[in-house]
Image: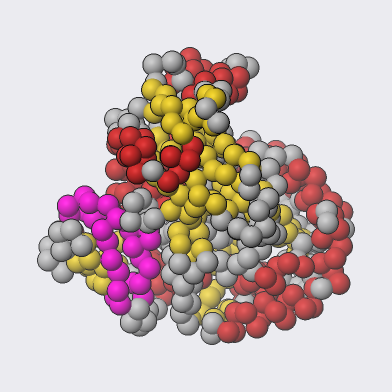
């Protein structure tokens, strides 16, 4: 079914959707303070529908909160991410789209929704907030707003992250406050330059949930508020070991050095052994990102390991030749050049090459099938879900690395980009079956992961086209016409 048909279908299911959203939020005992919305509507009676609403994405329940705040069936939801159908079954009949900000398709779809007198809610953050602050927002969102040419509102939801963070399974109880205000008029969009508009947007959408708790004097008395925190706080500030953190109850500690932190009722992290190591979630997060930047600058980052791969469409249906198996075994390499993924899809061997400057972000699912951690890579109309052992590497670190590489390569000159793919990199020839199941072959790849651009593989005793050559050719072709 096309996106335009989904918009039309949304009207018929509007009341069912809204009632479902109310039931979903009540099931986790979350109440919505709509006073800001009522005040906004009262003060802006002359504001004509439809308009664009930019909403924060602090938690997976934000779309449900937005649907409760707005009129039945009056909204079309646009996500700058690739997860949602499974997380929000009630959104199956809600007009929605998961998009790449660099695609023109999203503009055509939004214009069609506007033509049908529907408000459009856009979640411009690249992913659900991990540390309770605003995630990255691409400047390309301003291009979309200018093209659509409708008044722009901004809605900031407070409390959703504290009561339903993405890194834990259980939801907490509490109150969510939604603040809505007008951000841009049509005259602002027409007369202001993009940089000025972008700076205004960033200021308007900024939020810090830990600071909000303190300001509102709201305490979190949940005795398990720290559980799941090791999903995002993977590096110990004391001994600098990774993937050794374990959270339980209100505490998180390092299995390597034994240092321990307690999460306060306001979300701060208090060290029990050394007061100089107190931190906030945001500062700990920033420390981890700084370490990733240093690794990339010194070209020391590399990862290679065996993974499980599931290929699904955007309605979360498996796409696999062998209907008996929904997950296949593969091998993934990730270094300062990008990602190479090899796996068998049914009876066919697949190979995915992603240069560092071709994908602006990677989605994370910390609770895939209630047990695994995975990254989600969008490719056209499919999503490749890569699951791995979180004791080997953190999904958060993979996302940090990819975003830093994307930022770095986007700012490089053409000559510098091409120099990365010179033929001085190592290529290893291995057998696919031995690679997937043999420990010796895998150890060889891991040992040389920092120098390997990609791996040649042997199939039926014939050497296929070199993957290393492919990634170099792909990079050279991609950058030939760049200025």
- The residue lying at 48 percent from left, 14 percent from top is 415
Q: Which residue is located at x 57 percent, y 36 percent?
A: 351
- In percent of width and height, residue 149 lies at 77, 46
Residue 218: x percent and y percent? 39, 78
2 to 344, vertically: above or below: below
Closer-to-camera residue (377/147)? 377
Q: Please say whether residue 143 is one of the residues in the magenta stretch.
A: no
The N terminus appears in which quarter of the rendering? bottom right
Q: Residue furthest front?
A: 461
Name which residue lies at 29% across and 30% down. 298
Q: Is residue 112 above or below residue 259?
A: above
Residue 144 position by quadrant: top right
**How many numbered circles are shown?**
0
Q: Residue 43: in sight, yes or no? A: no
- Pick the front one: 384 or 200: 384
Q: Is the C terminus in the top left, top right, bottom left or bottom right quadrant?
A: top right
- Work out whether residue 88 or residue 423 is closer to the camera in this orientation and state it: 423
Color theme of the render: secondary structure
Q: Please state if 41 lies on the left or on the right of 297 as rendered.
A: right
Residue 146 x %, y %:
72, 42
Q: Is residue 270 above or below residue 145?
A: below
Type of secondary structure dominating the magenta stretch: loop
**What residue lies at 66% left-to-right and 53% top-to-bottom?**
322
Q: Can you give x and y, in whole percent of width and height, for residue 300 in the image?
A: 30, 33
Membership of 249 in magenta stretch: yes
Left/right placement of residue 218 relative to residue 9 reads: left
Q: Which residues are magenta?
A: 225-250
> Can residue 258 be seen from the camera position used here?
yes
């Amino acid at each position: 079914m096309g996106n335009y048909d989904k918009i039309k279908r949304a009207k018929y299911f509007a009341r069912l959707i809204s009632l479902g959203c109310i039931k979903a939020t009540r099931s986790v005992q979350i109440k919505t303070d709509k006073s800001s919305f009522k005040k906004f509507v009262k003060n802006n009676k002359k504001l004509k529908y439809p308009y664009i609403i930019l909403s924060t994405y602090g938690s997976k329940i934000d779309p449900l909160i937005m649907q409760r705040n707005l009129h039945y069936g009056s909204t079309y939801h646009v996500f700058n991410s690739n997860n949602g159908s499974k997380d929000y079954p009630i959104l199956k009949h809600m007009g929605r789209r998961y998009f790449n900000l660099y695609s023109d398709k999203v503009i055509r779809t939004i214009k069609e929704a506007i033509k049908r007198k529907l408000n459009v809610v856009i979640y411009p953050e690249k992913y659900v907030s991990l540390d309770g602050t605003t995630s990255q927002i691409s400047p390309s969102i301003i291009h979309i707003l200018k093209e659509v040419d409708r008044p722009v509102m901004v809605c900031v939801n407070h409390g959703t992250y504290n009561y339903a963070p993405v890194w834990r399974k259980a939801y907490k109880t509490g109150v969510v406050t939604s603040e809505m205000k007008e951000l841009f008029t049509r005259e602002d969009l027409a007369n202001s330059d993009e940089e000025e508009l972008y700076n205004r947007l960033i200021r308007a959408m900024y939020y810090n949930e830990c600071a909000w708790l303190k300001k509102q004097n709201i305490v979190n008395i949940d005795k398990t508020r720290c559980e799941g925190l090791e999903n995002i706080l993977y590096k110990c500030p004391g001994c600098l070991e990774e993937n050794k953190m374990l959270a339980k109850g209100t505490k998180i500690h390092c299995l390597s050095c034994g240092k321990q932190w307690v999460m306060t009722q306001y979300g701060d992290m208090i060290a029990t052994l050394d007061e100089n190591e107190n931190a906030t979630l945001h500062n700990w997060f920033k420390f981890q990102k700084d370490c990733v930047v240093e690794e990339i600058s010194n070209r020391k980052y590399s990862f290679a390991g065996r993974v499980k791969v599931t290929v699904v469409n955007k309605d979360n249906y498996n796409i696999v030749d062998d209907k008996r198996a929904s997950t296949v075994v593969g091998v993934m390499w990730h270094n300062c050049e990008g990602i190479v993924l090899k796996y068998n899809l049914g009876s066919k061997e697949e190979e995915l090459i992603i240069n560092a400057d071709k994908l602006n972000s990677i989605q994370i699912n910390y609770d895939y099938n209630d047990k695994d951690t995975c990254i989600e890579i969008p490719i056209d109309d499919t999503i490749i879900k890569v699951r791995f052992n979180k004791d080997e590497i953190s999904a958060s670190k993979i996302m940090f690395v990819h975003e830093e590489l994307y930022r770095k390569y986007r700012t490089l000159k053409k000559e510098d980009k091409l120099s990365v793919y010179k033929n001085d990199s190592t290529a290893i020839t291995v057998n696919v079956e031995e690679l997937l199941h043999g420990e010796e072959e895998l150890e060889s790849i891991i040992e040389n992961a920092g120098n390997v651009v990609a791996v040649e593989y042997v199939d039926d005793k014939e050497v296929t086209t070199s993957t290393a050559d492919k990634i170099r050719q792909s990079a050279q072709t991609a950058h030939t016409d760049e200025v």
